[in-house]
Amino acid sequence: MSKVHVATQINGEVHEFLCEPEETLLQTLRDTLGMTGTKEGCGTGDCGACSVMLDGALVCSCLVLGVETSGKEIETIEGVAGEDGLHVLQQKFLEHAALQCGVCTPGFIIAAKALLEKNPDPTETEIRYWLAGNLCRCTGYDKIIRAVQDAAVTLRA
């Protein structure tokens, strides 16, 4: 099969690229566009490491085809930090030592950001429920939950 032309918006910028019809969004981001912040953990949608926002919905980019993103808006971990520096969530992950190897961290931050945009004052149970699709093999989850709670407090202030 021949490659397909795709035009989409990623982190606020228009991107055009060619991709194979069977190529995942994860492969497109990493291999075609050089956006290596989004990680592959499992390749089956079970770990959340490759989480991105697609038209406002949290998705596993390993389960979405690159060709499906034409005309859509994507937010990746590369788009989280602002011109002034790290996003509050990124800073709180550092302050709470909520990361170790870093494979799961981008997915957790994207998922947590989606949660806090939807619910700026989540309970611990709501945070745990929302992040249940993200797996971490290094840190355990308490530091991650505390980082999200602290970020929520800071964002509300």
Image (tube, rainbow, N blue to C red):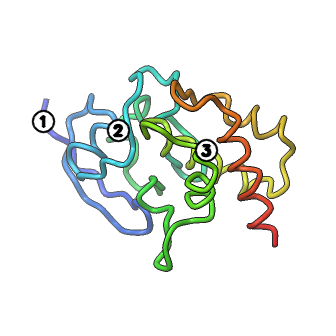
Residue drawn at the location 45% of the way across and 53% of the way down: 76
Measured as percent of width and height from the top left, residue 34 is found at 23, 52
Residue indicated by mark 3? 111
**Which is nearer the eye, 53 or 48?**
48
Residue 101 percent coordinates (x, y) = 42, 36
Q: Which residue bears the numbered disc 2?
A: 26
Image quarter of the C terminus:
bottom right
Task: Tell me the amino acid under the disc marked 3.
Answer: Ala
Crowd tier of the residue under label 1, counting other residues whose Cα lies within 10 Å: few below 14, some 14–19, many 20 or above: few
For image coordinates 87% across by 44% down, the residue present is 123
Query: Which label is found at residue 52?
Result: none
Local crowd at mark 2 within 10 Å, few (<14), some, or many (≥20)?
many
Q: In the rendered image, which residue does mark 1 sit on?
A: 2
Where, by quadrant of the figure, is residue 71 drawn? bottom left
Quick one: SS at disc 3? helix
Comparing 40 with 16, the one in front is 40
Discs 2/3, front: 3
Please tell me whether mark 1 sits on a helix, a strand or a loop: loop
Tell which tag, 3 or 1, sits nearer the viewer: 3
Secondary structure state at the residue bearing disc 2: helix
Q: Tag 1 or tag 3, which sits nearer the N-term?
A: 1
Which percent across, then down, holds residue 146? Answer: 73, 46
Left or right: where does residue 96 sit relative to residue 22?
right
What is the C-alpha distance between the residues marked 2 and 3? 16 Å
Rendered position, 24 above or below 17: above
Mark toward the viewer: 2 or 1: 2
Q: Quadrant of the N terminus?
A: top left
Q: CA distance from mark 3 to mark 1?
A: 34 Å
For the residues bearing labels 2 and 1, Cβ distance under 8 angstroms: no
Q: Mark 2 is on which residue type?
A: Leu
- Local crowd at mark 3 within 10 Å, few (<14), some, or many (≥20)? many
Please tell me which residue is depicted at 45% across the width and 62% down the height of the picture: 79
